[in-house]
Amino acid sequence: MGVLTSPTDDRDPAPDRVAAASTAEARPAVHGASAGAAGGRRDAPRDAGETAAALAGRALEASPRLGPVRLVCVDGPAGSGKTTAAAAVAAAAADLGACATVVHLDDLYEGWAGLEGSLWPRLSAQVLEPLRRGTPGRFQRYDWPTGRFAEWVDVPVPALLVLEGCGSARRAADRDAVLRVWVEAPADLRLRRGLDRDGEAAHDHWVAWMRDEAEHFARERTRERADVRLDAFGRADA
């Protein structure tokens, strides 16, 4: 099952999973909830939940830069825990009363060689530019089992858009992102996570992807440019 899922997808495998932009519905805000004291230093979060809440609060405090949308980019190598971190930030934003949507780049990569190429032009034309104009976006999901693009996925205009995946925080996103998050984990752990999910038959695909992403990150200096760094379990890097 080596090509059933993308290398950057650390969601639990589901045989009949249909990918879509997931939206966290806004819930009533808790009065007085804040990521930190106004005008003061933020206390360092002690665990992944506190980290996600602090990141959501920080993003929502920022002025939108993508039209009416605040863009948070969650980047890092495959298998590092980006998907879990992105979902936690979106859920924390919903707890603060904001509508948050997560778009996973693994639904847009054109297969194992899709980190570059048409990825960003398609994302920009289909999602980012419509949102900049205050209108919903719409992208065509890449289906890994069949190796072709499938159905179209609607992206609403949220208060917070979490863009998750390898390459999400490239320099092209800088003018729009209010927060760039880097998630990292040891290479052996990431490879093991991937092969546990995709099977040993995917080994060569994973090794090639890890090489491609390393070149991308070195060229873009993604880790160095990140505003926040998280470990493999979503905790803030001290």
Image (cartoon, helix red, strand yellow):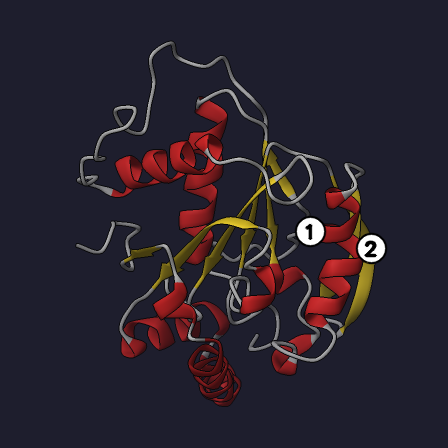
Q: Residue at (28%, 53%) from the top-left corner?
A: 233
What is the number of the mark on residue 18?
A: 1
Percent coordinates x, y for residue 94 in the rendering: 50, 26
Crowding at mark 1 (Cα within 10 Å: few <14, some 14-19, many 20+): few
Q: Tell me the kind of residue under disc 2.
A: Glu
- Residue 129 is left or right of residue 231, and the answer is right
Category of crowding for the residue at label 2, using alpha-carbon neighbours closer than 10 angstroms: few (below 14), some (14–19), many (at least 20):
few
Q: In the figure, is residue 129 to the left or right of 24?
A: right
Q: CA distance from mark 2 to mark 1?
A: 9 Å
Q: Which of the 4 image quarters holds residue 148?
A: bottom right
Of the two numbered discs 2 and 1 in the rendering, the one whose residue sits closer to the viewer: 2
Quarter of the image for the N terminus: give it: bottom right
Residue 162 horizontal/vertical position (percent): 54, 46
**Front residue of 68 and 80:** 68
Which amino acid, mark 1? Val
User: Which residue is at 61% across, 80% downward?
Assistant: 112
Residue bearing mark 2: 151
Q: Quadrant of residue 113?
A: bottom right
Residue furthest to the front = 39
Spot occupied by residue 98 in the image (x, y as percentages of width and height): 54, 25
Quadrant that contains the C terminus: bottom left
Secondary structure at badge 2 equals strand
Between 6 and 31, the residue placed more toward the observer is: 31
Residue displayed at 60% across by 32% down: 159
Give the number of marks: 2
Task: Give the SS element for disc 1.
Answer: loop
CB contact under 8 Å: marks 2 and 1:
yes
Q: Residue at x 65, y 45 (%)?
A: 66
